[in-house]
Amino acid sequence: MTNFASFADLRAAVHEVRQGDAAAAAQVAAREAQLTKPPHSLGRLEEIVAWLAHWQRRSPPRLDRVEVLVFAGNHGVTAQGVSAYPSEVTAQMVANFAAGGAAINQLARLAGATLKVIPLALDRPTADFTRAPAMDERAFLDAVTAGHAAVSREADLVCLGEMGIGNTTAAAAIAAALFGGGGARWAGRGTGVDESGLARKRAAIDTALAKHQGALDDPLKIAAALGGRELAAILGAAFCARAQNIPVLLDGFVCTAAAAPLTRLREDALAHACAAHVSAEAGHAVLLKELGLTPLLDLNMRLGEASGAALAVLILRAALACHTGMATFAHAGVSEKS
Amino acid sequence: MTNFASFADLRAAVHEVRQGDAAAAAQVAAREAQLTKPPHSLGRLEEIVAWLAHWQRRSPPRLDRVEVLVFAGNHGVTAQGVSAYPSEVTAQMVANFAAGGAAINQLARLAGATLKVIPLALDRPTADFTRAPAMDERAFLDAVTAGHAAVSREADLVCLGEMGIGNTTAAAAIAAALFGGGGARWAGRGTGVDESGLARKRAAIDTALAKHQGALDDPLKIAAALGGRELAAILGAAFCARAQNIPVLLDGFVCTAAAAPLTRLREDALAHACAAHVSAEAGHAVLLKELGLTPLLDLNMRLGEASGAALAVLILRAALACHTGMATFAHAGVSEKS
């Protein structure tokens, strides 16, 4: 198992990320041009297949083994009254995942995906980051390692998601530290805080940014000081997938913010990741724009749990079914464009 | 079989359309509020289930029998050089549908839907509407009747789509006649005409609008004079579905323009229809805005064949799976919002 000994160790590993295979993507495009439809008329469906091929390094790509990874963690910053739900809900929802009663259970089943839920020390919330770093270097790297280890080497696609009461506050703090703008730009209503809860959330983010000013020049220190265990695990899983030729579907705001620090270590570190959807959480559209990611879906969802990512798997399967199943002009005897 | 004797006969029938069941939609909303997720956090997925229940008049709704209807027709206006493909492609693609080689074959299979392809007198193209009405009253009503007859009474959902070289010109002409603006506002590249083809297309639309000025005060005369058989059939099928408590997914620009005249006979005549996607064809987004429809998907597709509608079935299945499969707060022992 890969184990990161220090920030510097992880930083060096990210700097060496593997590249995709442009030739596999070109093979996909060449076949698309032969299929019985006007050129490019399947739009993003065609792009998706090329993207899968590029990062899986094979044409055609496969979606035989799709994994949904949901990481769960608890957050000391809930002491600041930033969430509409009590912290106990994190563990209760993990039990609900195990019992098959959550949205992600239904969506993963429909998507033909294996669901793995990875709770991370739920009985030991991270520190309240308005007062101290959420995690020290060791705790952060342990969570990154757990995320890294959760990715099956045989997966064709990994969907990343999370559960953690309070974690939209952590995500907003990371986004603010990376991209500027403070609590007013990045805090949203999460699971549904009221007006005063939203004000507390903004204040908590601004307090944390001031408190940890010394750490803000290093993306990994930002992720440790302002993040959470499930966010660190997502970072580790996203990075691991890259090294294993596995494309990634990112879920919503928390998931995207969790992976975002990688792009500050290496600009193309998330080139193998696709934004499954844009959520209704206020900061997500802004964050996707900062990262240059165009979401596949926009359905006003804001649940987390990898729900948007699992939904997008259905679109990927449709794209691949067209690519592999359609007839060519020559085979079907259809006249080509004049 | 319902057979419409005259424009007046069809107009009267549309005026009497059946209403949905608000109580069934309310039952869906009441259950959604109990499921283990923050209220409304599944966004449009929740709205979709309520919409299905409303028009199926039952809670929960079902998607056991989903039908994809693809109507095909040929167009005299192709004589004006408005398409990048020859007219023969319509029949060639119908053969491709029968052989299972088209995109819609792959997408309908993945969506668990039955595909029915209905070619409408392909050997008798409509008249070139820059010179004469595309169809007379009888030919138009025969096509409407064929569309009406194609809808299975047992269907839980109907996806409407089309194939017909030249039919984005017909769709643009109908949209221009209904909503104003002429060829410049509504003509797009269709299957991919070049700049001069696009200019010819705009000119053909403007010529037709001038030629048939006397018919433009009546939505059914517009559909007959400027439309096509497959468009008329879509109008008939959309109307029939309403009478049978069957919600409808509209595909792209041609399909939406084909059904649009119904809204001029009765404002809420398409309340049971959902826009599956917004296509890349230039006029579609404008038309959806005119009709007050918000598309589910936006994937830069522009193929027709009901491809966008079949893709959206996957989203509807996901919505229904969450609604029927998720645990309630009480059952799962999860704390509710404070």
Image (spheres, coloured by chain):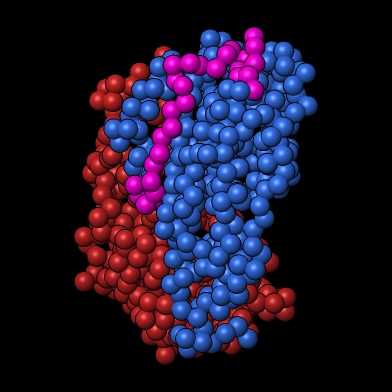
Chain colours: A red, B blue
Residue A327: name its quadrant. top left
Residue positioned 42% across, 90% down in the render: A123
The magenta segment:
B109-137
Residue at image x 35%, y 80%? A98
Of residue B166 and residue B196, the one placed in the foreground of this image is B166
Q: Quadrant of residue B98?
A: top left
Quadrant location of the C terminus of chain A in the rendered image: top left
Place of residue B106 in the rendered image (x, y in percent of width and height, measured from the top left): 34, 42
Whether B201 is drawn above or below B326: the answer is above
Q: Main secondary structure of the magenta part?
A: loop
Foreground residue among A224 and B140: B140
Residue A52: tell me if it is visible: yes
Residue A88, percent from left and from top: 49, 88
Quadrant hosting residue B7: top right
Q: Is residue B133 magenta?
A: yes
Identify the residue shown where x is 56% and y is 47%: B241
